Image (cartoon, coloured by chain):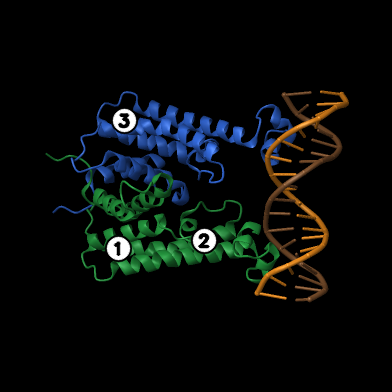
Chain colours: A blue, B green, C brown, D orange
Amino acid sequence: MRDIAGDVGMLAGSMYYHFSSKEELLVAVHAEGVRHFERAVEHALAGQEDPWQRLQAAASAHLETLLGEGDYTQVVIAELPRDNPPLRARLIQLRDAYEALFRRLIGALDLAPECDAGLVRLMLFGALNTSPTWYRPGRHTPAELGAAFVRLLKQGVDHHP
Amino acid sequence: MRDIAGDVGMLAGSMYYHFSSKEELLVAVHAEGVRHFERAVEHALAGQEDPWQRLQAAASAHLETLLGEGDYTQVVIAELPRDNPPLRARLIQLRDAYEALFRRLIGALDLAPECDAGLVRLMLFGALNTSPTWYRPGRHTPAELGAAFVRLLKQGVDHHP
DNA sequence: GTCTATACTACGATAGAC
DNA sequence: GTCTATCGTAGTATAGAC
């Protein structure tokens, strides 16, 4: 709290005028981060019609937001607190509203009948949201990676001669 | 440190006889966790010949270890410390040795020529390692989920009539 | 709306007795 | 090898002046 206050030119005590606790501040930052993702994905979807193109656009926008310069985005995929279940529940609720957007995008696809749409979503989110641990700028852009993951998921990686 | 010491019937100070700092203890626990994964995967691979079967067996063993009862495994996929680069580097080094095992398994596959083996590995690990955030016992076993993710990755999810 | 000052608790770590 | 006792620092939060 002292560090955060210092970064905005305050002392720690002054922040309690704006937020009643550290947890309330975390929830507020988290909510702002979710809004960043929502805005980016909705903008990327505008005008896209093909379901697979829409999922690709959304995945690319998600990664650009997650790996970009913004200060509010990495917190959205951070590990959830284990020691405070009510707080944990509030953060999960914020994320779920955003993930529902991807649920709809995947629901619009023509999936092979043996595929579980839930697992498809979890696999895509898993790939996208672990990218901060390995991504280094240079080789690929975030948008390219998002598109590449959707392509792998769509077509599969096995060789069909 | 006090909590951990308490769980083994010691006081905090006594632990510094065994580990010179909190960081050294973390590294030791991390290394033990990696050994758990390695043992489980090597055991699952014994006798498997087909490259896709081998990857599936490894993914299932990885998830059984990660989602099982063990006390040393979740720490291996925990978020890395941002404020201590030397410690961070040591933990990454431990994980990398284990991930090399999967690099070899994926290298043995006959992938479609347009597929990047590195992205395939990252996608699979992303799906597997985010499972603690959503997994609930009951619907699927960890082994089933590991096999399902490998199948999705192999065959793709698009419908081919 | 931000300050000063401070309360209370917790933390990692050490020294020296046993 | 574990204890007692403690050091110094940092954490969240509050009260009241300005």
Classify mark 2: helix, strand or loop. helix
Q: What amino acid type should be assigned to the residue bearing mark 1?
A: Leu
Question: Same chain for the residues at labels 1 and 2, yes or no?
Answer: yes
Seen at 37% across and 52% down, the residue is B128
Point out the residue furthest to the left here. Answer: B161
Asked whether residue A76 appears in the rendered view, the answer is yes
Classify mark 1: helix, strand or loop. helix
Q: What amino acid type should be assigned to the residue bearing mark 2?
A: Leu
Seen at 72% across and 33% down, the residue is A9
Q: What amino acid type should be assigned to the residue bearing mark 3?
A: Arg
Residues A130 and B44: in front is: B44
Query: Left or right: where does residue D5 sit relative to residue B51?
Result: right
Query: Left or right: where does residue A89 sit relative to residue B84?
Result: left
Residue count near mark 1 (Cα–Cα under 10 Å), binned few <14, some 14–19, many ≥20 = some
Residue A130, position as x, y percentages in the image: 43, 47
Residue B9, position as x, y percentages in the image: 63, 65
Q: Which residue is mark 1?
A: B105
Q: Is residue C7 above or below residue B9?
A: above
Classify mark 3: helix, strand or loop. helix
| Res B70 quadrant in image | bottom left
Seen at 53% across and 35% down, the residue is A72
Q: Is residue C4 above or below residue D2?
A: above
Query: Left or right: where does residue B27 sit relative to residue B57?
Result: right
Residue A16, position as x, y percentages in the image: 70, 31
Q: Which residue is mark 2?
A: B91
